[in-house]
Amino acid sequence: MSRIVMAVLGVLLGLYVVFGLLLPALFGLLKFVLVLAVVAFVVVALVTMVARSKG
């Protein structure tokens, strides 16, 4: 009986770790990378426009 209880507790703890800790961290990292990519695109676009206007 205690093996079943411990297995259920282990499954619940595993679900908590996946849905409570890992997924929000992954979505936060994805959002950070997306913002970083947008900023990099804007910088490259500005540098390209300035380089073409000077030449």
Image (cartoon, rainbow, N blue to C red):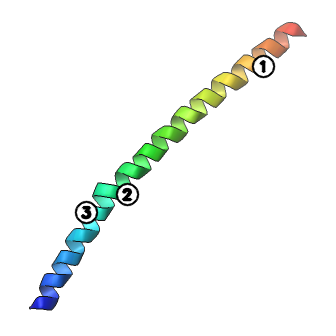
Residue holding disc 1: 48
Question: Relative to the observer, which residue lies in front, 52 or 32?
Answer: 32
The relative height of residue 40 versus residue 30 in the rendered view (above or below) is: above
Number of the label disc, if any, that sits on residue 22: 2
Closer to the chain start, of discs 2 and 1, is 2
Taking 46 as reference, is 29 left or right? left
Point out residue 12 in the picture as x, y percentages from the top left corner.
20, 70
Q: Is residue 45 left or right of residue 5?
A: right
Quarter holding the N terminus is bottom left
Q: Which residue is mark 3?
A: 16
- Kind of element beneath mark 1: helix
**Kind of residue indicated by mark 1:** Thr
Reading the chain from its start, which is encountered first: label 2 or label 3? 3
Dots 2, 1 in contact, CB < 8 A: no
Of the residues shown, which amino acid type is indicated by label 3? Tyr
For residue 34, the mark is none
Of labels 2 and 1, the one closer to you: 2
Q: At which x and y percent is residue 53?
A: 83, 8
Q: Say which quarter of the image contains residue 20.
A: bottom left
Mark 2–mark 3 Cα distance, whole angstroms, equals 9 Å
Left or right placement of residue 53 versus residue 43 in this view: right
Mark 1 or mark 3: which comes first in sequence?
3
